[in-house]
Image (tube, rainbow, N blue to C red):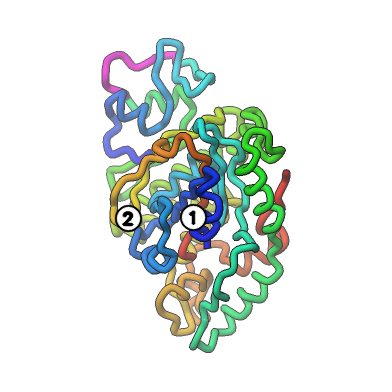
Amino acid sequence: MIVESLLMSRQAFEAGTGWQLKPEGACKGDVCIPLVDPPKGDTVDVASIAGQMGLPLVADENHPVWALGPDAVGSRTLVTAEAPPMTLPDLDGDPFELASLRGQKVLMIAWSPY
Amino acid sequence: MWQQFRNQLHPEGLEIVTVALETSGPEACRPYIEAAAPEHPSLIDQTHKTAELFGFVNIPNSVWIDEDGMIVRPAEAAPAPPSIERPARNAFAGVEPPEHLVEIAGEATKIRTTPAEYEAAVRDWVANGADSRFALTPDEVIARSQPRDDDAARGQAHFELAAYLEGQGHHDDAVPHYREAHRLMPDNFSYKRQAWSLEPSGGGLEGPVARFWQGPVEGSEDEWPYDGDWLRDVRAMGAENYYPGFTP
């Protein structure tokens, strides 16, 4: 997740990382990472919670922007088989939500012009 | 191609979603998408976030998702279905290919894929759903999803930052982050191909084919900003290992 301010709303953090901040910790599916100092209120200190969750927070030297990387829980990409929420634009910039295809089988294929 | 496959299987309940991994944005994808004229969703992923979400590590890769939104096969190589006829793609039509591209093409002929097995598996799943032997349980899906250790997670953060900076027009600032992503996640070939393909080509090539140069230009080797390049890396790993074979 691209981070332009190290203080962000709880909602933006949850939507961006896929981890829900609950009293028992940061949770995705059935998996929870306990938090020693869970965020109180609506604002999340990204550096603090990244440290607690073990998420890499990478800075750039020339621009005030960071990237918060994914978890390595279970040493695998997926911690649950539930497809994560995903919205991406089409060629015209119109957003498309993967979950809108519920009820059909979906074969999602990554390709590239290179 | 995928559009024709979709025409066959859409009446049986399959939808195809193509995702273009391209940090330079939609315009590089436009000629291909317009030529394919897809009726299925055709999306642009400028930060390769699907790599992080699903575990794509090369292209083409796929994931299968069932009617309830459960992944039933995690990221794996997705060769084009051999039953679909398609015009022979000759990227060099009308161009005398430079020696470097002849070498790449020669190496590419050694790449092994298992398209017949893959296509048969997709068709079996569409016909039989959860009863298909190719539809995995949630535990199998998690266990077979791409490995990700702390280095790989950090590499993905660097790649996302590179892609963001690229999108903002800061190519030179993106390069160190692409390099870190390559160092920390050396098996991720889409991260490498993406970065290599954004560097200048040699041989006087222009247009889409120039993206396949992916290596130093003779006489300007010092300007190549990466430790690896397509030919060197594929030769080192062995072209036959470029895509893992299909595992039922």
Labels 1 and 2 positioned on one and the same chain = yes
Residue positioned 69% across, 60% down in the render: B113
Residue found at the very far front of the displayed protein: B11
Residue B175: image x %, image y %? 42, 58
Q: In the rendered view, tell whether residue B214 sits above or below residue A73.
A: below
Q: Which of marks 1 and 2 is nearer the N terminus?
A: 2
The secondary structure type at the circle numbered 2 is: helix
Q: Mark 2 points at which residue?
A: B167
Report the disc number at residue B179. 1
Residue positioned 62% across, 48% down in the render: B76
Magenta stretch bounds: A35-44
Residue A60 in view of the camera: yes
Please give the chain letter of the residue carrying mark 2.
Answer: B
Under mark 1, the amino acid is: Arg
**Residue B128: quadrant of the picture:** top right
**Residue A76: quadrant of the picture:** top right
Q: Is residue B141 magenta?
A: no
SS assignment for the magenta stretch, majority: loop
Left or right: residue B133 versus residue B172 is right
Residue positioned 42% across, 34% down in the render: A85
Under mark 2, the amino acid is: Gly
User: Whole-Å distance between the Cαs marked 1 and 2?
Assistant: 17 Å
Residue B215: image x %, image y %? 53, 71
Residue found at the very far top of the displayed protein: A23
Residue A82: image x %, image y %? 52, 30
* Mark count: 2
Please give the chain letter of the residue carrying mark 1.
Answer: B
The C terminus of chain B: image quadrant: top right
Number of the front mark, 1 or 2: 2
Residue A63: image x %, image y %? 29, 48
Q: Which of B174 and B98 is in front in this view?
A: B98
